[in-house]
Amino acid sequence: MTSETSDDRTEPAGHTDDAGLLSPGRAGSAAEAATGDAAFLRAMLDAEAALVHAQAAVGLAPEAAADAVTAVAATAERFDVRDVALRARSAGNPVIPLVADLTAAVDDEDTRAGRDADTAQYVHRGATSQDIVDTAMMLVAARTVPAILMDLDRTADALAALATAHRTTPAAGRTLTQHAAPTTFGLKAAGWLSSVRAARSRLAAVRLPAQLGGETGTLAAFAPDDVTVDGAPGRTSTAASCEPVYDLTGPLDTTMDSPPEPLPDYPPATGPVPEGDSEPALGVDPAPDEPIYDLTGAAPNHSTGATTESRGAPGTGTAADTDTTVGDGLEADTGVRLLAAYADRLSLAEPTLPWHTLRTPVADLGSALAFTAGALGKVAADVLVLSRTEIGEVAEARGGGPATPPHRRTPVRAALIAAAARQAPALASVLLGALVAEDERPAGPWQAEWQPLRELLRLTGGAARDAAELARGLRVFPDRMRDNLALTHGVLAAERLATALTPAVGRARARELLGAAERLAAGAGIPLAQALTETDPAVAELIGEERMRALTDPAGYTGSAAAFVDRALAEHDADAEAEAEADADAEQPPADAPEPPR
């Protein structure tokens, strides 16, 4: 749907869509596809359709209206994303122009189908723009995070294989840029594995709630005192909305030509009539829908960490039976049941209350994404160091391009991951700053979240994709690690040799001898064992030549490295097994679930 061009919608010269030209890390990734403008538009349309279905579930709208709005919202390609974006300048957010287009499209479909019912009146009824944008952000996250989790699992599996293969492969430890006591490459890979697993667990535990509160978070537009449940519905597209009153079929206008029409009378709802009540209780559609996202493991559909494959798209099922009691068995009011039906329809978590200025969900998601980018950045930072020409202990499976000289293996994937990791903290800081949001709906903090959150999803998604490719193809060179260990002529094992000498000559004398031997070895470029022999032949005889060589071999001075690798691998295996069981449980419908339609 498009409108005539206005000053707010003047296209800049040379305008093109963001194709990721300056963001190669996320270009072509699943995260990029799930977070583009078209994906956000799709999510907003899904939120609008779910709102009508939720109203139908609690008896505030006919099912036919929900189906009609959903049918139009499902054809996202009919809406011009760029036109909506340009017209959003007049209202400060994209929901207002999108609702105008959606309302007009539903009206057109009513006319084309010859329907007398004015189904367009139910579009966006009772909601505010922030409800739709916040919910769309959570939907986009719910559709992006599973792909990130899948890539993190691939990365972890590859790192576990590296840790296993190089459990005892000796390598120089480095502290403050200098060689220190030896370690093993397996322990380094196990450290990467542990960080990635921690990031995966944290991201999977993030709760993604729907948002629905109306103008000030009270859902007052749906209060029972404000509606009746008998009689024919009237047109209330704008009067029942929590938005400023605009002409939704023409240019945006903040004035009212006539007072709003009264709220409609609705058809009778199903349900028993409570004793002492003059009106029937609002009914709830009893047909549950299978969860799509299991976001916490404890409650269905409310955390990002269930399966890594979607079994359907939010907004395609029927509303589930919702609990109609709160607290000590008190009857849940209409707004509470509406919120539950809305969240269930979208397969998002049901919030305890609207969170218009309680921005914890966004800050929590942003923090988890930044944490994940940082964990992947640690892997990249080590690979960048170890890939240097003068070190050469690892190399990416492929690096550079056709123009890259044969002797260079540029760590391209590691560079892209490191770039993402350095951007993520600044983006997350914007989301953390937005926690300081005033009143019942904020001006500025909420709008400031949109781009940083999307960029975090994209950067982390691209980094996870690249990390999986890097880890699976990483080439390790044990011989080069041994060569590098030899650069210090066995000095890395000096502490071990001092420990062996202490019983014979005392601690002070042992340290004195080893200090002199270290200086001789470094200055003359000879092995530490030879330097100790030249410093004090008698002391060297106490240890013996063969034992001296063994004690100064860095490969034999790796302490508990192998045991720590085993611990990390056992933890990985246990986590992977638990996740597989959780995924299997999520695939199984509840015992009392109805048979799926044939």
Image (spheres, rainbow, N blue to C red):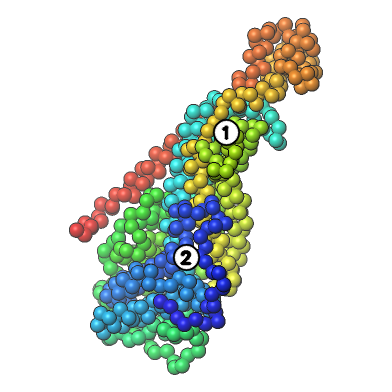
Question: Which of marks 2 and 1 precedes in the sequence?
Answer: 2
Dot 2: element = helix
In the image, residue 377 sits, relative to residue 336, either above or below, namely above
The Cα atoms of the two marked residues, 1 and 2, are separated by: 39 Å
Q: Quadrant of the C terminus?
A: bottom left
Q: Position of residue 527 (x, y in %)?
A: 71, 16
Dot 1: element = strand
In the picture, measured across the screen, residue 435 lies left or right of residue 514, that is left
In the image, residue 508 sits, relative to residue 312, either above or below, namely above
Q: Nearer the viewer, residue 282 or 24?
A: 24
Cβ–Cβ under 8 Å for marks 1 and 2: no
In the picture, measured across the screen, residue 178 lies left or right of residue 201, that is right
Residue 581, by quadrant, is top left
Q: Which residue is painted at 33% across and 71% down in the image?
A: 70
Q: Position of residue 125 (x, y in %)?
A: 39, 78
Q: Which residue is painted at 60% across and 38% down in the image?
A: 405
Residue 483, by quadrant, is top right
Q: Which residue is mark 2?
A: 37
**Total label count?**
2
Q: Nearer the viewer, residue 157 or 304?
A: 157
Q: Nearer the viewer, residue 570 or 143?
A: 143
Q: Position of residue 126 (x, y in %)?
A: 41, 77
Q: Nearer the viewer, residue 178 or 367?
A: 178
Residue 430, by quadrant, is bottom right
Q: Which residue is mark 1?
A: 394
In the picture, measured across the screen, residue 474 lies left or right of residue 313, that is right
Outermost residue to the left: 598
Q: Which residue is painted at 38% across and 69% down in the image?
A: 77
Res 242 visible: no
Q: Amino acid at mark 1?
A: Val
